[in-house]
């Protein structure tokens, strides 16, 4: 039985890693069933949150207004994760968002993972719902802050150990980590129209946007992908307004 891994959970603006953004990261390093490291951070996605996400998570635009952009948080997370095995409830969802982000930064990110949702489907097939909250209710695992990243990550680790205690002796192989596979779509470069509009926005507001972009030199703007440029434009408009 694996005794060292990182339990991971993300909260996002939606379900599509190609279009949506991460708004919260929670991770706990587990060694011999004890938490030996913690990572928890909010991320400003540069766009208003969908109402359904606010209702689901309790995270609001106000809470994210002073949060950092993705880069410093996800670079720090990359260092925290190291090469450890990842664990989560539907871990491929979380992995796909991270894989997508790191691929845009030319960072290698290939990991092994263990999925408590897959285990719940295998061993608790008779249960109508295999959601994290439903499985926690069944095993009497307390999660005081459901749908918040760090709490869900720790809760998934607790569920993993409960399932292992009940089913691990009979089927130990089911609890072995597997390679996580997700292939992000190739991103096209910033378009000429985006480049012009983004530079015009920067000039119009005459702003120091270090929190949005490392610098405003033309060469850096040109290095953005089409989707990164779109998110950058949305964030500038959200924080500073449109050109009038």
Image (cartoon, rainbow, N blue to C red):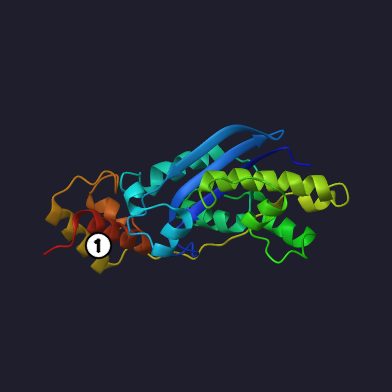
The C terminus sits in image quarter: bottom left
Whether residue 115 appears in this view of the structure is no
Residue at 39% x, 66% y: name it: 188
Above or below, 236 relative to 79: below
Q: Secondary structure at mark 1?
A: helix
Where on the picture, by quarter, is residue 52?
bottom left
Horizontal arrangement in the rendering, residue 68 relative to residue 117 (left or right): left
Q: Residue furthest right?
A: 170
Residue at 76% x, 49% y: name it: 163
Instruction: List the residue tagged with mark 1.
Output: 195
Q: Residue furthest top?
A: 36
> 10 Å neighbourhood of mark 1: few (<14), some, or many (≥20)?
many
Horizontal arrangement in the rendering, residue 78 relative to residue 6 (left or right): left
Residue at 57% x, 54% y: name it: 95
Front residue (pair 219, 195): 195
Front residue (pair 5, 9): 9
Horizontal arrangement in the rendering, residue 156 relative to residue 48 (left or right): right
The N terminus sits in image quarter: top right
Residue 142 image point, x, y percent: 63, 45
Residue 182 image point, x, y percent: 58, 60
Count of picture labels: 1
Residue 70 image point, x, y percent: 40, 48
Residue 200 image point, x, y percent: 16, 60
Horizontal arrangement in the rendering, residue 58 relative to residue 143 (left or right): left
Whether residue 116 appears in this view of the structure is yes
């Amino acid at each position: 039985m694996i005794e060292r891994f990182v339990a991971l959970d993300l909260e996002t603006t939606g379900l599509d890693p190609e279009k949506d953004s991460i708004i919260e990261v929670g991770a706990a390093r587990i060694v011999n069933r004890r938490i030996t490291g913690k990572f928890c951070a909010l991320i400003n996605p540069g766009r208003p949150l969908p109402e359904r996400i606010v209702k689901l998570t309790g995270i609001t635009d106000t809470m994210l207004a002073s949060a950092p952009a993705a880069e410093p948080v996800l670079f720090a997370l990359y260092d925290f994760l190291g090469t450890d095995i990842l664990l989560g409830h539907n871990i491929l969802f979380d992995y796909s968002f991270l894989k997508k982000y790191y691929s845009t930064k030319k960072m290698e990110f290939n990991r092994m993972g263990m999925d408590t949702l897959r285990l719940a489907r295998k061993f608790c097939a008779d249960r109508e719902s295999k959601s994290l909250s439903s499985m926690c209710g069944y095993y009497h695992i307390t999660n005081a802050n459901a749908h918040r990243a760090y709490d869900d990550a720790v809760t998934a680790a607790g569920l993993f150990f409960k399932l292992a205690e009940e089913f691990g002796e009979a089927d130990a192989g089911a609890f072995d980590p597997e390679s996580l596979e997700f292939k992000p779509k190739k991103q096209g470069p910033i378009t000429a129209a985006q480049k012009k509009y983004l530079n015009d926005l920067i000039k119009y507001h005459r702003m120091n946007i270090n929190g949005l972009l490392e610098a405003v030199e033309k060469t850096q703007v040109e290095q953005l992908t089409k989707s990164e440029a779109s998110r950058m434009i949305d964030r500038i408009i959200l924080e500073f307004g449109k050109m009038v």
